Image (cartoon, helix red, strand yellow):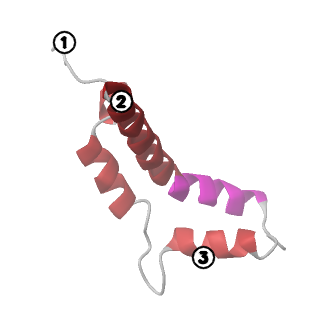
Amino acid sequence: MKNCSYNMRSYLQNPAVIIMLCLTLGLAPFQPEPHIVGKIRWILGGANGMGLMDWFDFLFHGFPWFLLGRLLAIKALRLKKKV
């Protein structure tokens, strides 16, 4: 078996991978509006009628955005620490 230097942790910390996840999974399907936008509107409207599958769908499409926020926070903290 070939020794691979990449593991899942390194992929989830790679800015290019995270941005691609946000642009694909995070926004899909694109028409008539990004799916995550509809879910956020639904939640902000009180989440009336949301079932377990809708919450899972929100987490599934929101996870790339969480990773992006996490990455930006880490970068900001490192930048602040250097100053």
Q: Residue at x 31, y 34 (%)?
A: 11
Q: What is the x, y in percent for residue 82?
A: 31, 26
Q: Looking at this view, name the residue that lies furthest to the front.
A: 83
Residue depicted at x 71% and y 74%:
42
Mark number displayed over residue 66: none
Which residue corresponds to mark 3? 38
- SS of the residue under disc 3: helix
Q: Is residue 45 left or right of residue 71?
A: right
Amino acid, disc 3: Gly
Q: Which residues are magenta?
A: 52-62
The tag earlier along the polypeptide, 3 or 2, is: 3
Looking at the image, which residue is at 77% across and 76% down?
Answer: 45
Q: CA distance from mark 1 to mark 2?
A: 37 Å
**Could you say which quadrant of the image residue 76 lies in?**
top left
Res 24 visible: no
Disc nearest the viewer among 3 and 2: 2
**Residue 4 shows in this picture:** yes
Of labels 1 and 3, earlier in sequence is: 1
| x, y percent for residue 19 | 31, 53
In the image, farthest residue toward the left: 2
